[in-house]
Amino acid sequence: MLAIMRKKRAKHRVCLAVIAGAPIFELSVPCEVFGIDRPALADPWYAFGMYADTPEIEVAAGFRAVRSASFEDLVHADTVIVPACGSVRDGVTPTLLEGLRRADAAGARIAAICSGAFVLAEAGLLDGRRATAHWLHAAELAECYPAVTVDPSVLYVEDHVFTSAGTAAGIDLCLELVRRDHGAAVTNMLARYMVTPPHRLGGQAQYSWFPERSTEDALLGTLLDWARDHLDGQLTVRELAEHAHLSVRTLIRRFNQVLGVPPVRWLQNERLRLAQQLLENTELAVDQVAARSGFGSAANLRQHFAEEVGVAPQAYRRTFRAEAAGADVAG
């Protein structure tokens, strides 16, 4: 094995701040990247420890994490990583928040994976900054912490502190931290060990899904079903109102009250959702997908995909076809 030589230096101290109920995958990624000594890649590697408010802490799926770092280790770490938390509402203690603030004030590099961004936001470390999280949590993060500029479309982002999307994006973020510490050659070899791509740009899309919105409002539910059957037409808010036998103003108010979005936004999300399904599950050309989903032209579909999904329709299709092919091979 070819060792990548590095000048001897003090170990970079990484502290993982563990919260009760933390998901296993997001918890294990920093342990895999920073917690295994790798002298063939860089010597020294990292000094790694896990901090929790109690000697043992129960995480997801019945596992327990054992504290190996003290509060002072947390405060004086070179890098502090907060993995996803089991609940964005519970489990975050004043002691942990104080430790994160002190570590930040001492100059530590602070990072969060997925819903760990809520912990950093609660500590005030994201105020006035850009951050991301898993797209499922992004709206709640923005609502709970209006001082944070939430970008739900990217894999990871740095604005003084680092935040990432969920699950696999945690690998991307941790590899990016290694790349900054040890360079591309070390990171590429580490990625080979982990059998993962060595570098995905932070600005790459999360490929968020536009979910179908349901409602118990009988009148509105009937209207939504009718509209979904006519997305290929040039539906207008006035047409929706006429079909529901409501005024335009009443319709808009009802959409906002029941669905939380105005009719125009709902139509756009439904068209994007349909376009995603067609790209994933059919061989239709992009212009045909555009026509069936109500975008009219391929150019219009590309514009909306770029704005909302972050990639071109063909790139989206290639990604999900590749994932499907990989699943078939694995099966």
Image (cartoon, grey):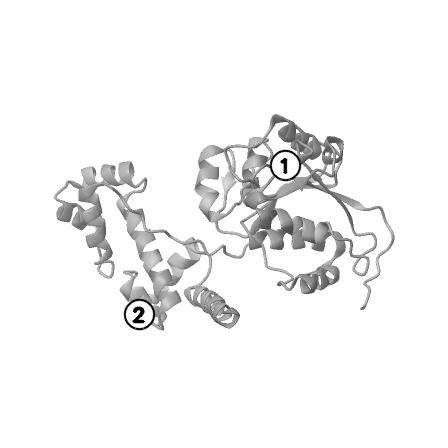
Q: Is residue 143 left or right of residue 289?
A: right
Q: Residue 13 — which label?
A: none
Residue 1: which quarter of the image?
bottom right
Instruction: Please give the residue where the numbered disc 1 appears in the rendered image.
Output: 57
Q: Residue at x 32, y 51 (%)?
A: 212
In the picture as drawn, the residue positioned furthest to the right comes out as 8
Residue placed most toward the observer, 296 or 241? 241
Q: Is residue 222 above or below residue 73?
A: below
- Residue 214, x across and y down, in percent: 29, 46
SS at badge 1: strand
- Residue 284, x across and y down, in percent: 34, 72
Q: Is residue 70 left or right of residue 25?
A: right
Q: Is residue 56 visible?
A: yes
Label 2, label 1: how far apart the Cα atoms are: 53 Å
SS at badge 2: helix
Instruction: Please give the residue where the numbered disc 2 appears in the rendered image.
Output: 288
- Type of residue at label 2? Gln
- Residue 114, x across and y down, in percent: 55, 45
